Image: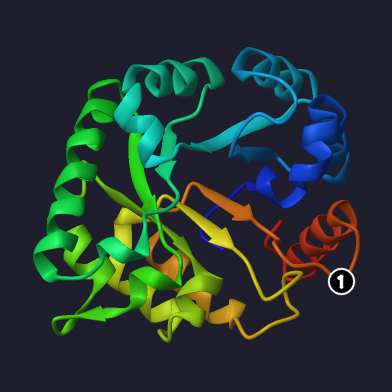
Amino acid sequence: MSKNIPVALQLWSVREDTARDFAGTVKAVADMGYAGVELAGFGNTDVRGAHAAITAAGLKVAGVHASIQDLRSDLNRWVDAALLLGTRHVMCPWWPREHYHSAAACTRIGEELAAVGATFRAHGLNFAFHNHNNELAVVEGRRVFDWILDAAAPRDLGCQADVYWVQVGGKDPAEFIREQGRRIRTVHLKDEKEIGTGPVDFPAVFAALEAIGAVEWYVVEVEQYNFAPLESVRRSLAQLRQWGKA
């Protein structure tokens, strides 16, 4: 590897645990050996409580997810949250698939996201859109994500690639990564269940990421499980270690 890329856990993977005990869960994540966490909500606490618990566990915040509804209603709140948490990365994790009905509609989404990103950039923060399989659908001859990203300058809108959802969407994840290049600062490492148990060709994924050299965080996410969620994320980190990626 060209550089040591830290590994964070997307806490959505253990959302039932954080809903019961955020501080205890992030400590358990730290004890497994994760370097950081990515936030999608704050479990049974708030942003200040989350920051205190994450700091106490010795973890860093790789990034924070904020819905487009939340960004529209109070963008400054998310600027403040990112600055408090000490992260450089904010991601919009989802958009209604019904809105991807035309090239013009997709372009307008990209323009709105770029305007949000310009505000974050003014505060030294990176903003990105996180893909699911819906963004890989073809509309008027091109993929939805291509229309969205082409409507925004890279400095205002990055791409948080989720390699499993790219795969489900019918595109090779390594090819997708090479296409998006330095827009990808954080990447979701996900498989059908635990990492290494599904269709994703992770050696090709890592080769593409390392060739570009822009990724700052690997982010593990598990949404379907063969085990209890905490055990699933532990096994996923163990697999990355076996591959020499953690």
State which quarter of the image contains the C terminus. Answer: bottom right
Examine the image and state in which quarter residue 76 appears: top left
Residue at the farthest left position: 104
Image height of 88 relative to 6, above or below: above
Q: Secondary structure at mark 1?
A: loop
Residue sitting nearer the eye, 91 or 55: 91
What color scheme is it? rainbow
- Which residue lies at the image location 60% right of the left edge and 52% below the top edge? 219
Reading the image, the residue beneath label 1 is 226
| Residue 24 x %, y % | 88, 29
Residue sitting nearer the eye, 75 or 81: 75
Residue sitting nearer the eye, 169 or 6: 169
Image height of 150 relative to 201, above or below: above
- Which residue lies at the image location 26% right of the left edge and 61% below the top edge? 99
- Which residue lies at the image location 78% right of the left edge and 34% below the top edge? 19
Examine the image and state in which quarter residue 244 appears: bottom right
Q: Is residue 131 visible?
A: yes
10 Å crowding of disc 1: few (<14), some (14-19), many (20+) = few
Image height of 232 relative to 6, above or below: below
Q: Is residue 140 left or right of residue 223?
A: left
| Residue 88 x %, y % | 43, 31
| Residue 212 x %, y % | 37, 64
State which quarter of the image contains the N terminus. Answer: bottom right
Q: Is residue 191 left or right of residue 228?
A: left
Residue type (three-letter) at the residue carrying disc 1: Asn
| Residue 242 x %, y % | 80, 69
Q: Is residue 10 visible?
A: no
